[in-house]
Image (cartoon, rainbow, N blue to C red):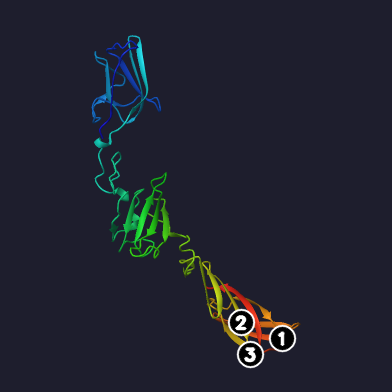
Amino acid sequence: MALPIFQRTVVNDAGDIIPSAQVEVRLESSGALASLFSDRAGVTPLANPFTTGAGGLAEFYASPNEYKVTATSAGDSIVWRYVVLEGTAALSDVTTSATDTTAGRLLKVGDFGIAGNVPIINNVDVNDYITPFSKKVFGSGCSNRPNENVYLVEVHGSHDTNRVTQVAYSQELTAIESFNSIYFRRTVDGGTNWSDWRELFHTGNILGTVSQTAGVPTGAIIESGSNGNGSYVKYADGTLICTARNVQSIAGAETFGFPTAFMDSSASVVASNSSSTSGSDITIKFSSIGTASYVSVLTVNGTLTAVVDYRLIAIGRWW
């Protein structure tokens, strides 16, 4: 990159040129002597301090920064504070590819997916992409995606080059709301090992169909529904709650179905009568509880009865 230039003629308060002045240049930030050059390319070093010619011209090239420039000669002295040397973008090298990380180069539109479309790439390993602040769209055949959908993956860096976070946004090409999932994962060893993808929940996916694989939730957080047998709520942790209102119309035992199935017969069922004859002693006994139904025996004042209207709640697990 071409270096910016400093050019001043050293003069005293009367405006007279000070020839053969000694010029010292220091960084304002630290007070250290600056690295000076006599050419724009920064190839030929210049002594610091250096001496001007008879014409009093102080000239040097240096990296963009803030400088304190002091010129002295035969008792005369002049100081320039906070001299800002700025680089020129037009003279800087640009990146040679969309993933060029060479220090000091200027980004082009589209580099690392910035301010440009990101093409879909296929048949690569998502684990290999750890360049901070870059993004790629991973499609067919790409391993280590959250699932088989197409994903835009952003890479976020940290204070440690080995610590990288990937954020994956599902990309459905035909419908806005069809795939609105977002996942993230991390590596702390430069991509050798990655954590599992974790899904972020939001208003678009907190409700839906719950699911699990080997005891690990893989679907929505809450699922609810109803049918002719009552209503139910399923939770991602495996809890299932069923509610219903039933009218038993025959004496003795009768089988009713739950609105959805429990995983086993360990569900707890509690019931209360909705209406009955005043002063009646209503007893509702559950003699058998299965995964999808229960068997009840009802009595009124100790006698098997023909009709009782009652409500129930059953709590158990769906996995």
Tell me the SS state at disc 3. loop
Which of the 4 image quarters holds residue 307? Answer: bottom right
Screen quadrant of the N terminus: top left
Alpha carbon of mark 2 to alpha carbon of mark 1: how far? Answer: 16 Å
Whether 94 is drawn above or below 140: the answer is above
* Residue 238 located left or right of residue 6: right
Residue type indicated by callout 2: Asn
Q: Nearer the viewer, residue 265 or 190?
A: 265
- Look at mark 2 in the image and give the residue it sits on: 246
- Look at mark 1 in the image and give the residue it sits on: 300
Of marks 3 and 1, which one's residue comes earlier in the chain?
A: 3
Residue 213 visible in the current orientation: no
Residue type indicated by callout 3: Ile
Whether 258 is drawn above or below 184: the answer is below
- Look at mark 3 in the image and give the residue it sits on: 250
Residue 94 visible in the current orientation: yes
Whether 231 is drawn above or below 78: the answer is below
Q: How far across and down, in percent of the image, does residue 311 sit?
A: 63, 78
| Mark 2 surroundings within 10 Å by alpha-carbon count, few (fewer than 14), some (14 through 19), many (20 or more) | some
* Residue 25 located left or right of residue 317: left
Alpha carbon of mark 2 to alpha carbon of mark 3: how far? Answer: 12 Å
Residue type indicated by callout 1: Val
| Mark 1 surroundings within 10 Å by alpha-carbon count, few (fewer than 14), some (14 through 19), many (20 or more) | some
What residue is rendered at 30% in x and 38% in y? 104
Q: How far across and down, in percent of the image, does residue 66 sit?
A: 36, 28
Tell me the SS state at disc 1. strand
Q: Nearer the viewer, residue 232 or 295?
A: 232
Which of the 4 image quarters holds residue 96? Answer: top left
